[in-house]
Amino acid sequence: QVQLVESGGGLVQAGDSLKLSCAASGRTFSTYVMGWFRQAPGKEREFVAAIIWTGGGTYYADSVKGRFTISRDKAKNTVYLQMNSLEPDDTGVYSCAAGGGQVIFRSSGYTDWGQGTQVTVSS
């Protein structure tokens, strides 16, 4: 089991930037992919970005390409999500997740989840 703790959320205005962190502990050696998902009120959870832990390959939802960057610090067991040019539609609870397989774009591919951090973007 992997324990994940997100931080860095907050209230910002449209056009601002925010950087989220996800600190991992526990059985991190079993992790293949680390992903970020978000969920707005009344909507389903959606994929945002993912990174392959060992090789560093990255994947992004079309809605955030060019604005968000996912990265990792292997020595710190930490994943980051740099969010630039934030929009009101980016508002939601952002959760970090760890998966041991090769399913990247769906929630079903991840077995361990953090509790989430709130990101609110005002217009």
Image: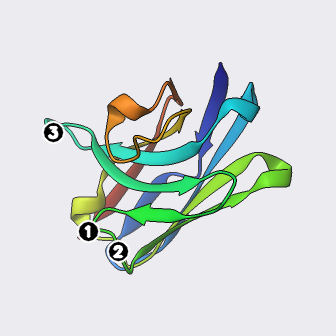
Give the class, few, some or many, for how many residues have Cα within 10 Å of label 2's Cα (few <14, many ≥20): few
Give the class, few, some or many, for how many residues have Cα within 10 Å of label 1's Cα (few <14, many ≥20): few
* Residue at mark 2: 65
**For the residue labelled by badge 2, is the local secondary structure a helix, a strand or a loop?**
loop
- Tell me residue 54's x, y (percent): 69, 53
When the figure is inspected, residue 59 is found, relative to residue 77, above or below; the finding is below
Q: Which residue sits at x=70%, y=41%?
A: 23
* Residue at mark 1: 62
- Tell me residue 86's x, y (percent): 35, 71
Horizontal relation, residue 55 to residue 17: left or right: right
What is the three-letter code of the residue carrying label 1? Asp
Horizontal relation, residue 26 to residue 110: left or right: right
When the figure is inspected, residue 83 is found, relative to residue 75, above or below; the finding is below
Q: Which mark is residue 76?
A: none
What is the three-letter code of the residue carrying label 2? Lys
Q: Judge depth for marks 3 and 1 and give the one in front.
A: 1
Q: Which residue sits at x=38%, y=45%?
A: 37
Q: Which of the image's four quarters has the C terminus? A: bottom left
Q: Which residue sits at x=63%, y=32%?
A: 4
Q: Earlier in the sequence, mark 3 or mark 1?
A: 3
Tell which of 117 and 109 is nearer to you: 109
Q: Earlier in the sequence, mark 3 or mark 2?
A: 3
* Residue at mark 3: 43
Tell which of 116 and 68 is nearer to you: 68
Label 2 – label 1 distance at C-alpha: 5 Å
